[in-house]
């Protein structure tokens, strides 16, 4: 395995007195899609928040491309090439779609003289957003809002994308579109770390899978193997046996 | 008819001041969930900064600049750092009550440290009447309307046309996501407080020539701005503008045609009617907030 793009070593984090991540250790290889699976409360979202500096790591080390990024603020992480798309609605409802996307480059706007071209590229990727470029983002459908968030995240050409539950509340067709967008990004060499409630469909498009339980990484392996691992299926994929 | 136009212009002038103060009120709410019940006193105090500066021999323009500067420091930055930041952790209601305490503190401080008297205050525009199409229009009222609308347009351009303005809007609409995108959320909130300080000092320079500088002069104004913000729609600047102008005009007409005695009840009637029939305000919308 080549040098991992992201590595967590003994990371501890939580909310108040509650510790969620308790010495979490894992690494993510460069390129490809890695899906994080695990039961509710396993700490999947907490891992993302901790990596992205939204929740302080109380102990341990987080490395990105060999560099220590533990507890860096989002600004520095964006500059390093990481982008985080949390679950739920993450738009500014009363700003226009174009202005929403532009804000993705706020940390770098001064040195980006090609911002219009980057936004144009985002519209090429998601044509539905172009049609709505100048209307309030609140008028977008759920799927389009997710597209907006992805487009905004891609503005700074991240090397690593952390995306949490992108398919929640989307119609099957839009889920497919979103997954297709992730696959395109993988083809372009971006590393994607994905949390997905619809774990089985996610694993089908993934290269690697990470099983998280009680804030600890239990298994890391090829997605196909984990998809067909009966224990994992029974525990985390909603009972393969019933299908 | 001529009296009517005079009344309308007078009402628009009062309304313009209400609108400026109500916008500041709504901005603070949007950026930091601060309901500032001292907003009226925030308009009262800058006039005394100006009086002190002019007492030391400063010409009007310099006194106005000093007033805005001192307001930015005291009513903007210090207000945020010393009262809002420590209190907001305890919730919106304790915060609102703390601002009521601040209002009393400001009134009593001015009374004790300066004076309990009412002081005349110079006007930006000379108080002369113009005869326009038979109507007697006060030049001072026109000056107030022009200055206030200028301030509102300036603020709107800042919010809508600049990246800083959109970062401020983003911070108000979704602070968590703003932070994720690397927007300096704290600085944007501070900037909102600074803008409110500028707005209240402009309102102070406009209103004090009419109502005199007195420690208690913020009471009615603060209430009017609060009602204007609510009837217009608490969460929309447009709402604060509509609410301000509407209240000013109705207030003036009611005083002339109904009764001066009931004048101060009229805003409350409008408030009740709006709350009954349009609870989100005339231009407001449902709160969509991710906290």
Image (cartoon, rainbow, N blue to C red):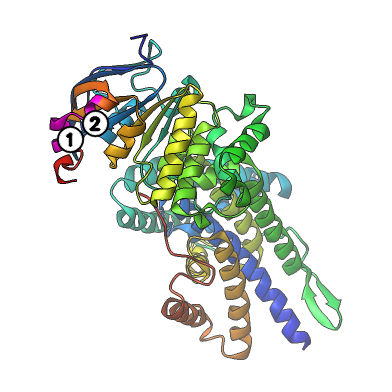
Along the horizontal axis of the image, is B75 left or right of A2?
A: right
Q: In this orientation, does residue A192 appear?
A: yes
How many numbered marks have been drawn onto this rendered protein structure? Answer: 2
* Residue A234 falls inside the magenta stretch: yes
Which one is nearer the viewer's eye here, B101 or B197? B197
* Residue A11 falls inside the magenta stretch: no
Quadrant of the drawing holding the C terminus of chain A? top left
Please report the residue visible at 46 percent of the width from the left and 37 percent of the height from the top. A180
Residue A42 in the image: above or below residue A148: above
Residue A229 in the image: above or below residue A93: above
Magenta stretch bounds: A225-236
Say what secondary structure mark 1 lies in.
Answer: helix
Please report the residue visible at 62 percent of the width from the left and 51 percent of the height from the top. A131
Q: Position of residue A123 (x, y in %)?
A: 61, 41
Residue at the disc numbered 2: A227
Which of the two discs, 2 and 1, labels the residue nearer the N terminus? 2
Q: Position of residue A20 (x, y in %)?
A: 19, 32
Residue at the disc numbered 1: A233
Q: Position of residue A197 (x, y in %)?
A: 28, 42
């Amino acid at each position: 395995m080549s040098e991992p793009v992201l590595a967590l070593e003994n990371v501890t984090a939580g909310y108040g007195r509650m510790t969620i991540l308790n010495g979490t250790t894992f690494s993510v290889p460069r390129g490809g899609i890695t899906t994080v699976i695990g039961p509710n409360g396993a700490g999947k979202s907490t891992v993302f928040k901790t990596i992205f500096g939204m929740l302080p790591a109380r102990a341990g080390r987080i490395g990105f491309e060999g560099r220590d990024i533990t507890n860096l603020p989002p600004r520095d992480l964006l500059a390093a090439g990481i982008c985080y798309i949390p679950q739920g609605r993450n738009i500014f409802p009363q700003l226009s779609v174009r202005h929403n996307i532009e804000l993705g480059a706020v940390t770098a706007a001064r040195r980006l003289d090609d911002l219009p071209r980057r936004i144009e590229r985002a519209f090429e990727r998601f044509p539905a957003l172009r049609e709505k470029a100048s209307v309030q983002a609140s008028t977008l459908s759920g799927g389009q809002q997710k597209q907006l968030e992805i487009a905004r995240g891609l503005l700074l050409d991240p090397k690593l994308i952390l995306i949490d539950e992108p398919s929640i509340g989307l119609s099957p067709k839009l889920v497919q579109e979103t997954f297709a967008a992730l696959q395109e990004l993988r083809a372009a060499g971006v590393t994607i770390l994905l949390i997905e409630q619809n774990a089985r469909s996610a694993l089908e498009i993934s290269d690697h899978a990470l099983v998280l339980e009680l804030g600890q990484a239990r298994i890391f392996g090829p997605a196909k193997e984990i998809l067909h691992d009966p224990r994992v299926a029974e525990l985390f994929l909603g009972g393969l046996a019933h299908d | 008819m001529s009296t009517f136009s005079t009344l309308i212009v007078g009402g628009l002038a009062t309304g313009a001041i209400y609108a400026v103060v109500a916008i500041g009120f709504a901005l603070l709410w949007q950026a930091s969930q601060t309901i500032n019940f001292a907003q009226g006193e925030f308009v009262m105090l800058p006039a005394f900064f100006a009086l002190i500066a002019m007492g030391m021999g400063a010409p009007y323009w310099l006194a106005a600049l000093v007033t805005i500067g001192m307001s930015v420091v005291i009513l903007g930055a210090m207000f945020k750092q010393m009262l809002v930041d420590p209190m907001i952790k305890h919730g919106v209601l304790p915060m609102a009550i703390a601002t009521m305490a601040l209002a009393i503190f400001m009134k009593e401080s001015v009374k004790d440290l300066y004076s309990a008297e009412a002081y005349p205050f110079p006007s930006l525009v000379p108080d002369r009447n113009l005869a326009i199409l038979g109507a007697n229009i006060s030049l001072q009222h026109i000056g107030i309307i022009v200055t206030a609308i200028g301030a509102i347009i300036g603020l709107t351009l800042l919010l809508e046309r600049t990246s800083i303005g959109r970062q401020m809007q983003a911070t108000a609409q979704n602070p968590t996501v703003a932070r994720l995108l690397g927007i300096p959320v704290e600085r944007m909130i501070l900037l909102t407080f600074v803008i409110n300080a500028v707005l209240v000092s402009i309102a102070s320079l406009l209103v004090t020539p009419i109502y005199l500088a007195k420690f208690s002069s913020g009471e009615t104004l603060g209430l009017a701005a609060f009602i204007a913000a609510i009837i217009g729609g608490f969460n929309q600047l447009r709402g604060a503008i509509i609410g301000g102008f509407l209240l000013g005009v109705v207030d003036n007409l009611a005083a002339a045609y109904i009764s001066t005695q009931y004048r101060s009840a009229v805003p409350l009637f409008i408030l009740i009617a709006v709350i009954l029939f349009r609870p989100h305000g005339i231009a407001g919308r449902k709160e969509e907030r991710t906290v």
